[in-house]
Amino acid sequence: MAKITQALTAALPGLAKAVFSQPVEKDGAQKIEIRPLLLKGERRWQAERFENSKAFHQNFADDALLAWAEENIEGRFRQALIVTETESRQYILKRDGSYKKTGGAASVPRPVGAQSHNREKDYILREGENIPALVDLGVFTKDFKIVRAKYDKFRQINRFVELVAQGVKDENMDRIRILDFGCGKSYLTFILYYYFAVRCGMQTEIIGYDLKEDVVERCNGIAARYGYTGLRFETADVTKDRLADTEIDMVVTLHACDVATDYALAYAIRRGVKHIFSVPCCQHEINLSIRKGGELDLLLEHGIIRERVCALLTDSIRAAVLESAGYAVDVIEFVDFEHSPKNLMLRARFTGKRRNGGRERAEALQKQYGFRQSLLELTTD
């Protein structure tokens, strides 16, 4: 009798994906998908089970996957699709409980020697990947294609998570706790959770803060729908409310408006949070308060130049304050300017090594030009 687990065994280790659909019984999983993933540098297999409109995930080594498939897949689904690096095969369940191959086709071959690089590059987020939360959030269509109007948003969150993954890849972490300040519709929050909890199989807790109660309620509903038990959203004003007092590993902000970024950075500094990834948004504070007072007056003559100079000065001061608090800081291009004018990221990692010169120069400029800058004020001893 031909077993589907035999076909699955033959497909390893070159399996690209396997999809099992049309369940025999009404109760239980409606569909199961299996894909490869890298977990702490080693190949593993992730089984994604869809049941009662929720997605559940388990990660396996080779032998454990096959044993699990024998118990949970064999004879339970009428259709199966197994795709390897060289071909795709379709199977149907026969009356006697065996599986019959009904079709096959060649797959697009991958370059020899490039398999690991290609998978790692696509590993963060890709079109066609089954990420149901992105459908609810309007980034993907129901067949997991990118909504054209959301393409720039897709690029932004993909790049953000890629940078986060690079920042923690050498730390051998098995758990992580993240705060997302000013999470809004929470595109980034959901993808960070998906990446760490689902893709990496880590124990993950993420808290998203936002001012809007209806947005928070909707996001909590989406998290519950997909079984994201470690993800929760809270209504909070980061400039006023008491925030999490538990140990936090990472603070992220994506376009937290104006001084909300400063309050997030100040929180991270006070708590000694190890990792900070912050992409600022509108930055009005210095522009509205600066006065002429010296050699930089020429840069304040014209509105558009003044606005850009003040935005760059704001981020330069933020970087200097972080360095004075013991962080190693990079200011990097987040995405191409054509995709978003808000394209700088402050990436910081706590080392304990303080550099005070930048903060002192920032304070001297503040005194000379009379501007306000919240992070300077929030971190004054």
Image (cartoon, helix red, strand yellow):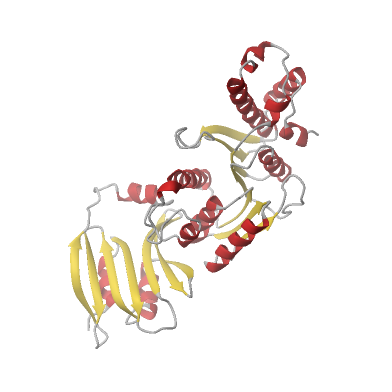
Residue 277 in the image: x percent, y percent? 58, 42
At x 41% / y 68%, what residue is drawn?
A: 47
Q: Nearer the viewer, residue 255 or 348?
A: 255
Q: Is residue 260 visible?
A: yes
- Can you say whether 326 is above or below 273 in the image? above
- Can you say whether 225 is above or below 165 in the image? below
User: How many badges with numbers are in the image?
Assistant: 0
The residue lying furthest to the bottom in this view is: 96
Residue 245 in the image: x percent, y percent? 74, 54
Image quadrant in which the N terminus is located: bottom left
Residue 86 in the image: x percent, y percent? 21, 58
Residue 197 in the image: x percent, y percent? 52, 60
Horizontal relation, residue 169 to residue 77: left or right: right
Horizontal relation, residue 204 to residue 266: left or right: left
Image quadrant in which the C terminus is located: top right
Q: Nearer the viewer, residue 73 or 154?
A: 154
> In the rendered image, which quarter is residue 261 located in?
top right
